[in-house]
Amino acid sequence: MISNLLNLVGLYNDVDMLTVDIPMVRAGSDPVIFALFNKKVAKKLCKELKDVDSYTNVMKSSRFDSTYVVYSESSELESELINEKIAKVLESCSDILQFLHISDHCSTVRAYVFVT
């Protein structure tokens, strides 16, 4: 009941968020920054993720044109990182997936609350 009251006044959000951090091995790997943002939160997240804001550009994507925005260092990264099967899964999860961020830079997101 308390969470419902807090939700009414905007102090509580009952949306769950899962974050998975996987360390990348730096020895012999090329630099990589790739982000797939849901269009609803793309501008906000681009500014909050320092590596995306500094080193990437919006890329044209034929697979994610309707629901996602792709930010990358190069146009080849999308096809190298995401095959057709993964693309179909990401499209089917567009109502719950806010972003996918792959980077070799140490990057943090400032604290914020997702509202869906």
Image: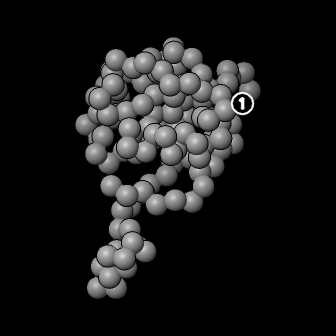
Q: Is residue 55 visible?
A: yes
| Residue 38: % across, % down | 39, 39
Work out which quarter of the rendered image holds the N terminus and state it. bottom left
One can see residue 22 in this view? no
Horizontal and vertical percent for residue 76?
A: 51, 14
* Residue 49, placed above or below residue 3: above
As drawn, 33 above or below 106: above
Task: Residue at the far right: name it.
Answer: 27
Residue at the image position 51 percent from the left and 15 percent from the top: 75
- Quadrant where the C terminus sits is bottom left
- Give amino acid for label 1: Arg
Depth check: 37 or 10 in front?
Answer: 10
Q: Is residue 50 left or right of residue 83?
A: right
Q: Mark 1 falls on what kind of element? A: loop
Residue depicted at x 55% and y 34%: 102
User: Which colour scheme appears in the figure?
Assistant: one colour
Q: Is residue 51 above or below residue 5?
A: above
Residue sticking out furthest to the left: 92
To which residue does mark 1 refer? 26
Q: In this view, does 29 lie to the left or right of 14?
A: right
User: Viewer-proximal residue, 50 or 78?
Assistant: 50
Query: Residue visible at 69% across and 42% down?
Result: 106
Q: Which of 34 and 30 is in front in this view?
A: 34
Q: Position of residue 83 (x, y in %)?
A: 38, 21
Q: Quadrant of residue 104?
A: top right
Residue 30 image-quadrant placement: top right
